[in-house]
Image: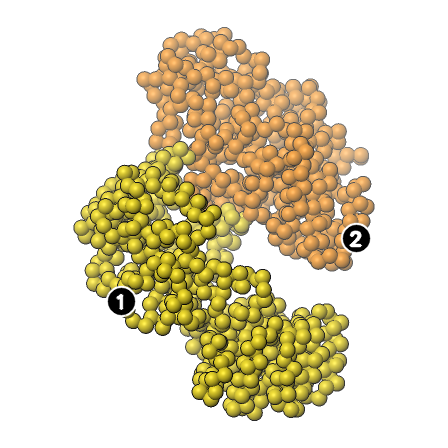
Chain colours: A yellow, B orange
Amino acid sequence: MATPSPVLLTTLTTVALAAPTLASTLDPAGDAGQGAMVRRLAVLAPDDTFLWIRVRRLAPDLGRLVTRIASWTQASGPLAGIVPARNLLRVRSAIKLVGNIERTGPGSAIAALAGGDFAFGVRMSGGRGRPFVIARVGSDREATRIRKLARSMFGVVVETRGPFLFLAPHGETAREIRLGLASRGIVEPKPAGRRILAELPRAPIAGWFDLHDTGPGTRLRNATRLANGGAAFFAGGMAGAIGRCPAVMFVADLATERIHFEAVVAGVEAELSPAARKVLFLDRPALVPLPKVPGTVARLQLSRSIGDFFLERRRLVKPRAVRAIDRGLSNIENLFRGYRLETDLLPAVKPGLRGIVRLWNEGDKTDAPFRFPQGLLNIDYEGKSVQRAVQTAAQIVVLASNQGRKRRGQLVYRPESETVRGYHVAIGELARPQGDRPWPFAAGVRLMSTAGKDGFFYGTSPALLVEVLDGLAHTAPAIAGGSERVLDRIELSLATAAKGFAQNLDVLATRLMLGEGLLPSDSKRLLTQVGHILAASGEVVVETALRNGGLVASFDWRPAPGFFDARFATGGGDK
Amino acid sequence: MTGGWLEAWRPGPGRPWDIRAATHLLRRATLGNPRALVRRCLELEPREAVDELVAGELAADNGVDDQLAATLPTVLASEAPEDLAAYLWLRMLATSHPLRARMVLFWHDHFATSVQKVRSAYWMAQQLATFEAHGLGSFEQLVLEVAKGPAMLRWLDNDQNRKGRANENFARELLELFTLGRGNYSEDDIKQAARAFTGWRIRREAFYFDRRRHDTGEKTVFGKRGPFTGEQVIQMAVARPECARFVASKLCAVFIGPECPGPARDEVAELFRHEGGRIGPVLRTLLASRLFFDPRFRGTRIRGPVEWIVWALTSLEVLAPPQLLHRAAARMGQALLAPPDVAGWDEEEAWISSSAWLQRANFAGRLGTTIELRPALDDFVPGRGELSHLARRLFPEGLGDAGPEIARQASAEAGLPRPVRLNGLLRALLMLPAAHRF
């Protein structure tokens, strides 16, 4: 039988059963609130679902939470389990409680809830909830002692795996728990994972990570101090709210092959300071992503008002950071000859940043042997003066880059220009190497910059600019109003990225060879395997959005059909 | 023509062709002593082993050299000298022609050229390719090719050498450091030779002879007069007996050690002349000679950082991240592609400064966690102990007096987790005095 990874279990033992909006759930809201809770759990906890609860440093509200859970489990099935313990190493009482639950029902256990730190949960099966406990034991000797103790108790099955102890009133449940944990699979050896997958019922596994339950002084708790506009700019709206986020929902559904995380924090929008609101430009229409083009690997959208962040920096970040930013701005100002950043430029740089990466466009003509993905970055601004300033700055950047390249004995960019859909595009293209000198990587890109009505564009392919501009011409420029507003979004097509991976296998293999000391053949073999995994990995979307005044951060992964089978169910036999 | 020191070594009573002799040959000629090569050597007579070594046939050709060579354009595409250095490390570690790789390192020190001034990884790669192509061939051809390489042209400012404004840098080092040695030429020889090299330039990433810049006038070099060209000056320098003595002394310093007797060096110089300056045949005789196998000269050299690391890894038959090796060796005082000056690295005792020793200890203490030790332990027999297993890889001839101390340490650390234990053992073995001498 497979042994669950301690790492995995450490993660899982932090899973807590709590609704995404815990605070409201815990309010003694009577039948209506309880009904909502039950409905939510019923949706997320069908048969063969595992729900974990982590009990540690019990919050005052946990008693009420427990009451709710107990009510729900009694309503939806004959049994659910709540098991307390003072700490991880003291599991004797946990064993007793599991026994008590089986004999007397959950009510008797609730009184014992006062503190502790271990995981307990419910496995739904046949309309019933079966309780179990996962606890960490201090040593083999202790595990043996506990096992002996458990054997002497009626109806409790105990098994140890590594440093973890599984307690359940039914042997079947203990086994299923382990299978459920192992189904995450990535830390399991292949043969074991394959066997587990074959035995595992294809059902969703759901849980909630309780972010309140991290104890004082921990990183997450410290994150509450980041609840300011500065953090909101750098790390997204989530950074400002994560410390107050009560819970994160997690759903893994092997049947539909979907992994979804979602965190919800209510009331964030109302709490944002005026400065932070400006940085997140909530008073303006939301950004729309750049249009998809053929071979799109990734699209990025960050809704931050760059100009407002710098202008409001004294309100948003600490004085020491302000001084560092001031120095940086002073340096940047040198690029914008004749313009003052604070008065001329920053007020005009308004919302957000958008980007797109796509595979090498086979239509692009080049003698260089590289087929690198092409990228385009777009920053919005207002005002013609900015247009001239940023174009000049972009050209200065290329010139400065050329100086550096020349000093290092590298080939330099040859400045060119083209007019594309009304945009005057400055292009830096590397001169062809002379003699037998190999093409440098820099020849794999055509640096380009331009500015126009859709903002400033900086990228590596004028052809991509054309396609994006054509797409934008047919896209509504912004989304106004509505109950949901996407702040940040990254879409990644791993399957498409795999094609880029294959196109550049030689380059990647050489980099791996130099970095890791692998022979070229070994590098290629390893990367080919990674490429196969990428190709099967489907799509990933990471998003933060304001929804009904609350902040929702989500991660959604939809691998290609058969992904999990391919990972665990193929290859040699059990050994 | 050989006699005395260079007569062929013949094993006999008291001087067996055994594991000690074979590891001595491999360590001096190839830096490492991997088991397969030790075994192969012992299957052959010493003379045959040396012949195969020089011909690049001692190790089975696993195709790795071709594989690595095929990646060079991509390595150079980053335009980063560090990547070329990492590539060079991989070549040294994985090659199936280890003597050639050893000679690339030898000539890199002899024609010491630094990328810090040359600034082009491509030009440095061209120079390394020259060492590889001609390092075992004609010395005259090697000097000519190196001199015309863009790396050397830029390194010693010969690309700035023009009629009426002769730049003497290259001519001076050609005579002092590359061919004749100090005291074997006059200042006037340098001035006149420099005129012969006028008009040498770089165009389209390669050597270009600019007639308009060349001084076609008469020059007097080594007492001869004529409108000499650069090529002719090189030919004249290499043909001088001082050049044979100079190259012989360099080869003896590396392959025999600092205690090589003067008469033996003279014999090697004579051999060099006799072989027409072809390095391979010289080495074929030298490495199979009584001089080479004389027990008095074994273990008399101190390993440089590159030699030490390559010995450790090739003997353990493992690879390690080459960029990391490059940085580690640089901290120990030997950054490939960046010798301290045109005279190359100071060697022998100069390698072991207090800070360099500390760096070696740090590296030895981390190596076990950096490299994948599994290949080195693939035939590990638990009952026989990890210590003896690793020790046999590094010191096939045995640990000698150090054995009991290392065994005590191994015993004391027996209770530690295996990775920690192996790392500790490796550190102890690599910091033995015997690990730094060869």
| Res. A119 image quadrant | bottom right
Is residue A374 among the parts visible in the rendering? no
Which residue is pictured at 60% across the width and 74% down the height?
Answer: A58
Residue at (70, 57) in percent of width and height:
B418
Q: Residues within 10 Å of mark 1 (few under 14, many from 20)?
A: few
Q: Position of residue B73 (x, y in %)?
A: 42, 42
Farthest residue to the left: give it.
Answer: A422
Label 1, on which residue?
Answer: A480
Please state if B323 lies on the left or on the right of A290 as rendered. right
**Pointers 1 and 2 within a single chain:** no
| Residue at horizontal 76 percent and vertical 53 percent from the top | B413
* Camera sees residue B162: yes
- Three-letter code for the amino acid on which mark 2 is drawn: Ser
> Toward the viewer: A61 or A202?
A61
Return the chain for callout 1: A
Q: Is residue B54 above or below residue A460?
A: above
> Which percent across, then down, holds residue B436?
69, 37
Q: Quadrant of residue A482?
A: bottom left
Tell us which disc is closer to us: 1 or 2.
1
Residue type at mark 1 is Ala
- Label 1: state its secondary structure: loop
